[in-house]
Amino acid sequence: MSSLHLALFLETTGCHYAGWRMPSSRPVPHPADFKQLKALAMQAEQAKFDLVFMADKLSVDDIYGNHFAEAVTHRVTERPDPFSVLSALSAVTEKIGLAGTISSSFASPFAAARTLATLDHLSQGRAGWNVVTSTSGGEARNFGVPLLSHDQRYHKADSFIEAVFRLWDSWEDGAIVGDREKGIYADARKIHYADINNKWFNVQGPLNLSRAPQGRPVTIQAGGSGAFTELAAQRADAIFASEKPSLAAAQTYYAAIKAKVVHYGRSANSLKVLPGLQPIIGATQKEADELLAELSQLHHPLATLTHLSNTMDYDWSQHALDEAMPDILPHLSRRERFAPMLDHAREQGMTLRQFTKWIARSGFIVAGTAESLAERMALWYQQRAVDGFVIMPSWPGAADAFFDHVIPLLQERGIFREDYEDDTLRGHLGLQ
């Protein structure tokens, strides 16, 4: 049986809204603290993870109250450039994959293709990219362009990925000759114009960097809409999927996305399904529950609401925290994504404050012992609900327990590698 796949969400301050507030002997790390980033990447490599992943956002959230004040006050909003960090990490790691986020809404295909090809050369075949469609008006304002509609964003993303692929393919394998005696550096017959000309992009090419070691660095997508699923089934090598509420729901999603992949003429195994998982690990279940309770106690409701305001493009500041959940669904443009959570909150009679607590504790978080977590991960993997997980440590230092205690248990069960068998990220993921 192939190996379970694991990615580490590279976040020095923790992936939970309140993670940076958890008591620790260490000072609160900066998001661009390279010492901490390096330590996390090297720990993940020692544990034989497939890859580390850096998310990105191109603005500071400013929809709540039409200002950024509450967002920067109550949660970490800083985002270093992922590919600057990943390039530095390529020099201090040897095997682990290195992936970061690029927005198809604002990036240039030529610049993105060159950035990824550069990282793939520097790392000798370990680069990956998470293609996202930006949804924030703040991001659009930072680039001086209007925010596109949902459908437009996905049409542009499809054209963006195709353009990047064509730029990578503008150099064939073996184009570099390097014949000093004859004075021939490259075989021009193996280098081609990309000639991209569509509604969104006009790029001549060729790329001014030879073909990357992986040919095409690993393409990842994250999202949950119907348009996203169709695009991922056609183009992506991996999906960072939302964790489902039950094993049965995860199995249904897994089977559906794999069927779509096959429908588009691809092998079902050519797309890896990796939901997020925020493990909170204790020596006992009681200890894990206490850690989760402590994290929840430190959570500030505006940390959630400032984030949701930008994600939903809706200003939550117009509602009092202790009023009943309002029916805002008619005001949202992305109802498909948010209806389940909003309907549930209203059905349960939550106040807005209770809703923020529930959001902060739901979805990704699983509290338990290392044994119970390893058992759950193994079950979901073996029952064809996932191909692996994106491990999202809740606070600084929380990854240590996963590295030290969960990884050995997964290896004992024979579902996770004890050593790397390949040198590239495509190889780790079992991709062509």
Image (cartoon, rainbow, N blue to C red):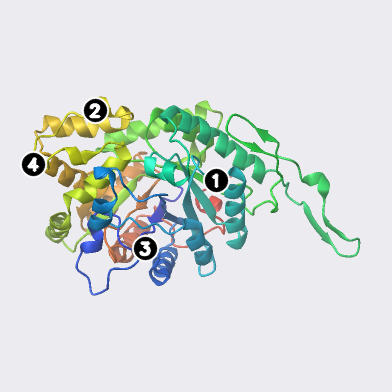
Q: Which residue is mark 2?
A: 329
Q: Nearer the viewer, residue 95 or 349?
A: 349
- Image coordinates of residue 122 in percent, x first then y, are 60, 62
As drawn, the label of residue 34 is: none
Looking at the image, do the residues carrying marks 2 and 4 touch, with CB atoms under 8 Å apart?
no
Q: Secondary structure at mark 4?
A: loop
Note whether 227 is above or below 374 in the view shown: above
In the rendered image, which residue does mark 4 sit on?
Answer: 322
Amino acid carrying label 2: it is Leu
Q: Position of residue 197 (x, y in %)?
A: 66, 32
- Identify residue for label 3: 31
Image-based side of 376 in relation to 345, left or right:
right
Which quadrant is the C terminus positioned in? Answer: top right
Residue that numbered label 1 is attached to? 431
Q: Compute the Cα span from label 3 to label 1.
A: 31 Å
Q: Amino acid at mark 4?
A: Asp
Left or right of residue 309: residue 191: right
Name which of mark 3 and mark 1 comes first in the sequence: 3
Q: Nearer the viewer, residue 199 or 36?
A: 199
User: What amino acid is labelled 3 in the image?
Assistant: Pro
